[in-house]
Image: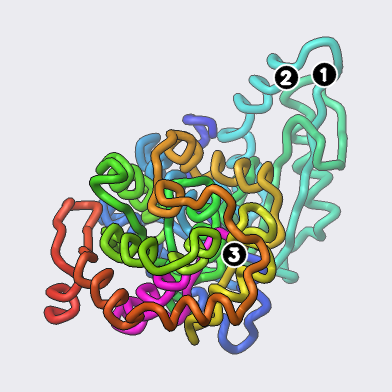
Amino acid sequence: MHPLSNYNIVICRYSEVALKGKNRWRFEKCIIDRLNLLLNMLPEMTVGKIRGRIIIHKQDFSTFSEKECKTVKNALNYVFGIDSFSFCIRTDTDMEAIKAAVYNCFNIKVLSTVDEIKNRLPTFRIRVKRNNKNFSYSTRETEIILGELVSSFSKDLRVDLSDKADFSLFCEVYKNFTLIYSEKYMAQGGLPSGSNQPVLSLLSGGFDSPVASYSMMRRGVFVDFLTFHSYPFTPMETVEKIKRLTAVLNKFQGNRKLFVCNFLETQKTICEKIFENFRTIHYRRIMFRLAEKIAALNGNKALVTGESVGQVASQTIANLSNIDSAIEILVLRPLISEDKIKIMNTAKKIDTFDISKVQTPDSCTVFSPSNPSTNAPKNMILAGDRKMDIKSLIDTAYSNTTVIDVNTNEEIPAADYFQSV
């Protein structure tokens, strides 16, 4: 982004939202609401829309400062529903005004591009979109006029109409104004936050569950989080790690709740009652039952996990079925067929990788059996259930669950939290 380009408007593009037909306005409103929330520190900034675009500008269309550009760009990196965005020059729909804007704002940028290219001729392209069909010049004529102008900036330039050109100039002509820009920044895509019903994610400290949570956020859902620890058998650093992961994920959606369950007493009972090879499945079944209870109280319509088929013993087809049979609520597994490399690459993209790679024990691993069953018979699991007081186990887990606001670090018992809301 060139600091001398005098940007005074940002256009935000979407693709999937455009397919929503008569409901598109609702998705657009979700994007606008999210942007207004993220840009509230810039009171002069206005968020609105034109056909097929979300736009950001000051009320008087004055030029953005460099700091304002950075603030807007950072905010747009955390908005779902937008595929790409560009910082633009807004000028009159008049050829002389358009040429003046291109010359004044992009002359230096083209010359700097030319200076950076060594051992070959630098290339450029012009792309015009004429939304105003009454404009005096056709699309082709406008591209030729602007192409000749850009060519005059340097004798070394040559035309390359592909997207591999070293410099691109885009011009969108509307009835009352024209937008000119040179760069497109990729955004998060997906559907805007709040356009689908909320879910509860079972968040561990590994790579998978944060990526699964992010994947669901991209589908327009708000995600709350539930994690388990077994203090003092697991260190409190495990919980601190989860809080850091939650804070990073909340950047994409706003402040959502983290539920933290000390699962130790429940695990001790399972260890006393259940054959070792089946314990992990029973841990998971009680975890899911507690998650179902919290989801019902919290208004979450589904559970989310980072499970992927065959990754560990509890994630075989048979054992996933054994775990799901304990509850009635929908379970979503966005990573079910993903490989580890792709998951880790996404973790790097969303800034959870460095947190997740720090090794800390979790509830399941610290009490993990030496030879867990990968194909537990359903009747054996149900027989194990009958050896325990399931309701008592859920109640114990719930009584040892707190709610943490990761922004303020305020922590209260879950039972007190739900009585107050």
Q: Residues within 10 Å of mark 3 (few under 14, many from 20)?
A: many
Q: Is residue 304 found inside the magenta-colored segment of the image?
A: yes
Rounded to the nearest whole Å, what is the CA distance between mark 3 and mark 1?
A: 41 Å
| Among the two numbered marks 3 and 1 on one chain, the one whose residue lies closer to the N terminus | 1
What is the tally of numbered marks visible in this picture?
A: 3
* Residue at image coords 38%, 53%: 363
Which structural element holds mark 1? Answer: loop
Circles 1, 2 touching at the beta carbon (< 8 Å): yes
Q: Is residue 21 visible?
A: yes
Q: Position of residue 228 (x, y in %)?
A: 34, 58
Residue 280 versus residue 146: which sits nearer the camera?
A: 280
Rounded to the nearest whole Å, what is the CA distance between mark 3 and mark 2?
A: 36 Å
Amino acid type at circle 2 is Val
Circles 3, 1 touching at the beta carbon (< 8 Å): no
Question: In the rendered image of this protein, does residue 145 appear above or below residue 268?
Answer: above
Q: In this view, does 289 lie to the left or right of 93?
A: left
| Among the two numbered marks 3 and 2 on one chain, the one whose residue lies closer to the N terminus | 2
Rounded to the nearest whole Å, what is the CA distance between mark 1 and mark 2?
A: 8 Å
Amino acid type at circle 3 is Gly
Circles 3, 2 touching at the beta carbon (< 8 Å): no
- The span shown in magenta is 285-307
Q: Quadrant of residue 256?
A: bottom left
Residue at label 3? Answer: 190
Residue at label 1? Answer: 156
Q: Where is residue 146 in the image (x, y as percent from the top left)?
A: 75, 42
Q: Is residue 356 left or right of residue 43?
A: right
Which of the labelled discs sits on residue 114, or is there none?
Answer: 2
Q: Position of residue 273 (x, y in %)?
A: 39, 69
Amino acid type at circle 1 is Asp
Which quarter of the figure is the N terminus placed in? Answer: top right
